[in-house]
Image: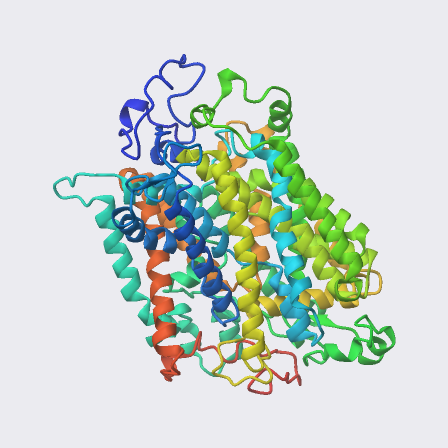
């Protein structure tokens, strides 16, 4: 790993064609005051230093297309979220689809001015469809593109626990968790949006695509324009996905070792990409590449390399060593599983340890016996512990001085970023707007939890504690997100804390986790979108309106879709009752439910505490704190070796938190594609990377999404299925079998 080379001189950068440059805004300042471009090379090569403040933003067509795209993406993403292979339709799909619609509305709608010569005059058609309208529509769409995490609470209570939760209280929980983080996001704008060093890598994909769709570019001899390249890549992605999406689903995880050894449990444990270590496995399906970690083309190479090292240590060192040394009776359980087991490897019957008040029954638990996890699952919880302390120590050691300096003297004129200078012409969102959002949401959350205590189980002090945790971690985790495109989660530590303070109440545990984790994540999503507006020169107040309205709309549509599916699909998420061909297995909801049992119902004291089997896992807290310290000491001792500073322990550890439900094939292929893009192409074909890398990422996403929806509506929805060996995902039926002598679990096709 190497430090990125310095950005090219301004003269080497082609003049952007995105919008009209504001002459005199940059060059009138001394070169020592405002750099001519961003000091981050990827930003300098991608984001134009230009603005046209005359372009209208909050237009009629923006509201129509924005609201419609948010609703459609919210419905589709929630619809596909319950399926065995969740299909995530990103905002890039809407970003492309609205282009012809925007131009159609600009040409068809009347340009008449209503209430002319009054202070209320307006028009439905202010002129040609422009890039700033397009950005705001995409912000709307991105609100619907993300998964609404709090829906997991509703699924767990209604589907898994078979208990009652009303639609109204479900809506209150979902809306407050989605909007709460916006309250304190405003406090961190100056730290996480305005500085050039906070460059938010994923936004460059969006910026590249906006430029490709709006710039007028003449085709040079022997080269494709950005639009032509995007169209070709989009068509190829669209056409290819018919194979992994319908005709040959085994392409999702090509585990050829299982084909060579069809009767060997050991070989399939090693070779399975979905239920084992995934050695020599590759995914030839873009959805399996970016399902959980996002696009590898948007990840900086040093972050990709850190994730690759962390994955290698977990899957090829920790997991096999602990399994074949039979740590925690590992051989009694599958080598890779998120299940909850008895001591004999059978699935644990959770309903037997819940009393009539929907709380933990200690006597029944003593009768049933302790709950066990696969050793792999236990180790991933340990890495989640390490991720928390590693994040704190890493940010203090490597960014503590920068944070202190920003607090004291940030954003003086001589240090202002060029894009911040251009954005200074627009009125900022008043701070009291964010304060009002914070106060109203906290008050509404406390009221809901106290008034509906029988359904939510979480007391008022739990709400305040969850908010305090989320607020405290927004800045350090935001720094990591803004520089590496990876987000360490707070889901496990929030479960751990409330599990000790308020054990035996699974819904309280789930609510505390969602308020403590998702409010922080939503704050970062808000800040990332604000940075996109920063790059594209969108007025901050217009950005704020699009984000808040889109978030509220997304919450309502996600919940409505989930409620409809739970009421209409028989045995949804119930793997024991549904047919083997049913796609409604809900992998992420199963992990969420299992966590509520471990941390909320039974409680960490009986799992990871003095009464539990896995108490030694707590040492990971210490290991997570020591690891960044060792890196920092090495960096100070060997200042000439700049690659040492690129070792990022929080990213190396926290990205593994996606496992499970993410599997080995998701990581192996993601790292491989990231290596080719971020290291090979970026180093040896810099010009190609600059023109095409992020556009390729958007085209692959869009092609997959459109074909995925088409396949479902035309074939799966009509019950037209293709049954043959090539459509058996992974093809490693024995990978989930244990290897302990005399053990036969209820989810393995043979007795080992």
Q: Quadrant of residue 28?
A: top left
Q: Is residue 344 found left or right of 287 in the rendered image? A: right
Residue 356 vs 640, above or below: the answer is below
Residue located at (52% from left, 66% from top): 277
Residue located at (51% from left, 38% from top): 646
Residue located at (66% from left, 83% from top): 743
For the question of whether residue 329 can be seen, the reply is yes
| In the image, farthest residue toward the left | 221
Percent of width and height locating residue 412: 54, 18
Percent of width and height locating residue 686: 30, 38
Residue 677 vs 121, above or below: the answer is below
Percent of width and height locating residue 535: 42, 34
Q: Is residue 609 found left or right of 492 in the rendered image? A: right
Residue 393 vs 640, above or below: the answer is below
Q: How many marks?
A: 0
| In the image, farthest residue toward the right | 363
> Looking at the figure, which quarter contains the N terminus?
top left
For the question of whether residue 3 can be seen, the reply is no
Q: Nearer the viewer, residue 366 or 561?
A: 561
Q: Is residue 751 found left or right of 531 in the rendered image? A: right
Percent of width and height locating residue 283: 40, 64
Q: Quadrant of residue 684?
A: top left
Q: Quadrant of residue 4?
A: top left
> Looking at the figure, which quarter contains the C terminus?
bottom right
What colour scheme does the image use? rainbow
């Amino acid at each position: 790993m190497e430090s990125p080379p310095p950005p090219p001189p301004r003269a080497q950068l082609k003049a952007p064609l995105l919008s009209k440059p504001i002459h005199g805004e940059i060059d009138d300042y001394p070169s020592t005051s405002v750099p001519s471009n961003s000091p981050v090379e990827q930003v300098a090569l991608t984001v134009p230093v230009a603005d046209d403040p005359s372009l209208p933003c909050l237009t009629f067509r923006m509201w129509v297309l924005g609201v419609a795209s948010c609703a459609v993406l919210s419905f589709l993403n929630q619809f596909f979220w319950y399926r065995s292979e969740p299909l995530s339709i990103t905002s890039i799909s809407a970003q492309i689809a609205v282009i012809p619609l925007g131009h159609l509305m600009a040409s068809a709608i009347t340009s008449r001015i209503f209430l002319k010569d009054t202070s209320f005059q307006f028009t439905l058609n202010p002129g040609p469809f422009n890039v700033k309208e397009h950005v705001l529509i995409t912000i709307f769409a991105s609100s619907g593109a993300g998964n609404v995490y709090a829906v997991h609470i509703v699924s767990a209570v209604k589907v898994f626990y078979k208990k009652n939760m009303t639609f109204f209280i479900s809506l209150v929980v979902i809306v407050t968790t989605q909007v709460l983080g916006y309250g304190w996001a405003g406090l961190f704008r100056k730290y996480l949006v305005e500085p050039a060093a906070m460059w938010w890598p994923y936004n460059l994909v969006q910026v590249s695509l906006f430029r490709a769709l709006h710039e007028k570019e003449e085709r040079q001899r022997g080269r494709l324009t950005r639009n032509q390249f995007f169209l070709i890549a989009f068509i190829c992605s669209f056409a290819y996905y018919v194979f992994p999406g319908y005709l040959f689903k085994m392409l999702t995880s090509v585990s050829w070792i299982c084909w060579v050894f069809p009767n060997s449990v050991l070989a399939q444990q090693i070779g399975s990409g979905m239920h084992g270590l995934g050695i020599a496995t590759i995914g030839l399906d873009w959805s399996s590449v970016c399902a959980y970690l996002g696009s590898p083309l948007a990840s900086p190479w040093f972050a990709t390399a850190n994730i690759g090292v962390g994955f290698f240590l977990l899957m090829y060192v920790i997991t096999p060593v602990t399994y074949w040394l039979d740590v925690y009776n590992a051989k009694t359980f599958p080598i890779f599983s998120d299940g909850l087991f008895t001591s004999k490897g059978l699935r644990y019957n959770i309903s037997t340890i819940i009393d009539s008040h929907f709380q933990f029954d200690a006597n029944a638990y003593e009768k049933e016996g302790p709950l066990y996890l696969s050793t792999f699952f236990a180790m991933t919880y340990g890495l989640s512990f390490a991720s928390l302390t590693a994040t704190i120590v890493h940010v203090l050691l490597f960014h503590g001085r920068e944070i202190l300096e920003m607090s004291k003297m940030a954003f003086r004129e001589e240090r202002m970023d060029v894009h911040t200078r251009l954005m200074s012409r627009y009125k900022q969102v008043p701070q009291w707007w964010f304060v009002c959002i914070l106060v109203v949401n906290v008050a509404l959350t406390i009221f809901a939890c106290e008034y509906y205590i029988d359904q939510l189980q979480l007391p008022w002090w739990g709400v305040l504690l969850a908010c305090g945790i989320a607020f405290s971690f927004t800045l350090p985790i935001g720094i990591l997100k803004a520089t590496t495109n990876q987000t360490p989660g707070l889901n496990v530590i929030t479960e751990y804390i409330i599990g000790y303070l308020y054990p035996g109440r699974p819904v309280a545990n789930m609510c505390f986790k969602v308020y403590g984790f998702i409010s922080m994540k939503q704050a970062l999503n808000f800040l990332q979108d604000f940075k996109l507006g920063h790059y594209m020169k969108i007025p901050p107040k217009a950005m704020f309106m699009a984000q808040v309205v889109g978030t509220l709309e997304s919450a309502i549509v996600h919940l409505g879709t989930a409620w409809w599916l739970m009421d209409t699909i028989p045995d949804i998420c119930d793997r024991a009752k549904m047919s083997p061909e049913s796609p409604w297995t809900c992998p992420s909801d199963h992990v969420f439910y299992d966590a509520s049992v471990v941390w909320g119902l039974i409680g960490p004291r009986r799992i990871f505490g003095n009464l539990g089997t896995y108490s030694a896992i707590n040492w990971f807290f210490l290991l997570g704190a020591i690891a960044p310290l060792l890196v920092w000491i090495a960096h100070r001792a060997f200042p000439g070796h700049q690659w040492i500073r690129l070792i990022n322990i929080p990213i190396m550890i926290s990205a593994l938190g996606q496992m499970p439900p993410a599997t080995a094939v998701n990581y192996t292929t993601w790292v491989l594609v990231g290596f080719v893009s971020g290291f090979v192409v970026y180093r040896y074909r810099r010009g190609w990377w600059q023109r095409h890398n992020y556009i390729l990422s958007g085209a692959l996403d869009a092609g997959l999404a459109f074909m995925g929806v088409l396949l479902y509506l035309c074939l799966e929805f009509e019950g037209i299925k293709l049954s043959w060996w090539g459509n058996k995902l992974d093809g490693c039926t024995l990978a989930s079998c244990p290897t302990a002598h005399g053990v036969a679990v209820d989810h393995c096709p043979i007795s080992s």
